Amino acid sequence: MGRIPCCEKDNVKRGQWTPEEDNKLSSYIAQHGTRNWRLIPKNAGLQRCGKSCRLRWTNYLRPDLMRGKFTDAEEHTIVKLHSVVGNRWSLIAAQLPGRTDNDVKNHWNTKLKKKLSGMGIDPVTHKPFSHLMAEIATTLAPPQVAHLAEAALGCFKDEMLHLLTKKRIDFQLHQAGNNHHHNQQSSAAKHEENDEDTIEKIKMGLSRAMQETGNTNINNNWESNNNDQLPASSSAHFGISSMFQCGGEPPSFDGDAWSQSMCTGSTCTAAGGENRRGRMDEEKLDEDDDDDDNVLWDLPSDELMNPMV
DNA sequence: AAGACGGTCAACCGCGTCATG
DNA sequence: ACATGACGCGGTTGACCGTCT
């Protein structure tokens, strides 16, 4: 079985393109356009797959492409759009003249994800980590919460370590029965602190925060909301957020140009699990636009390069 | 100086959707 | 209505390069 290959792989060159190949492709497309990618390599004298030619053209050779660093405004747009459409890189790129979906995707994966994580925001849902944990806590019984928190620790470990070590975030732990900030020198921020110790301290802080939250609302919410939707919002703060609070300021929720609009709580509509494409995306977006109670994204429609979104 | 490591980005792969017959 | 081919998309890989140890 299997899929029919788009071209004869035996006769096809792969890997990096040479300047000569670029010239052949560019000059052919300049003369004949981009109709029928399957025929283009043959007619242009290239031993390449049509797919490879299309990719090379759209991501590199197109004359309208803009190279260079992403501006703050572009990053702002990417984050906002991603909070609405998720990993629809082509949709997002359509709003950024001169940028390709590949550019946007790479920039997101290499820079923006870390930037958001560093601010305590989950790059998938665009919610604060503390908000996610609170939502989990309100819908599960305490024993399940404990297990989930343990699993979440694994997921967030890298981000946590990045925050606590590289960013030098002050991280101070509550000792049992001792809530005052007794140590000005963050143990986790020190180089000599190894990862295992840090993880253990994260676990301790999370456990403590869970206990505190559990005393207030977990049980009640479990009783009443077991099969209901997630609460529209929750004021419960625990887990990662409360741990930051132990050490003082949460990370970087400041006047950063694009930190204000990314997270408006549970109204976020992020990628999570959705994987529809094409027209279904547009339909979904139209539905979202009609939902005035679910407004997250405040980019005026006339700011958009592509009104489809 | 050299190897290890991590970040970046171009390119590839496989799947879904669309257009056409 | 269905089959088929072409295209577009998102995820992933791997080469390259700079930094660290």
Image (spheres, coloured by chain):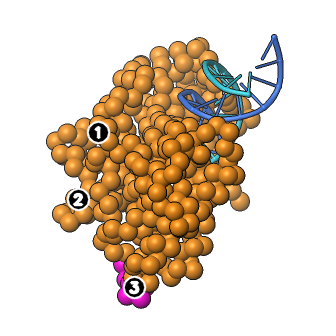
Chain colours: A orange, B blue, C cyan
The dot on residue A220 is: 3
Secondary element under disc 2, as helix, strand or loop, is loop
Residue A47 covered by magenta stretch: no
**What chain letter is assigned to the residue under label 3?**
A
Coordinates of residue A19 in the picture (x, y in percent): 58, 14
What residue is rendered at 24% in x and 63% in y? Answer: A294
Q: Which amino acid does label 1 sit on?
A: Gly
**What chain letter is assigned to the residue under label 2?**
A
Coordinates of residue A297 in the picture (x, y in percent): 26, 52
Residue A140 appears in view: yes
User: Image quadrant for the N terminus of chain A?
Assistant: bottom right
What residue is rendered at 39% in x and 57% in y? Answer: A127
Query: Which stretch appears magenta?
Result: A223-229
The dot on residue A255 is: 1
Q: How crowded is mark 1: few (under 14 residues within 10 Å), some or many (20 or more)?
A: few
Q: How crowded is mark 2: few (under 14 residues within 10 Å), some or many (20 or more)?
A: some
Q: Residue A95 appears in which quarter of the rendering?
A: top left
Q: Mark 2 — residue?
A: A295
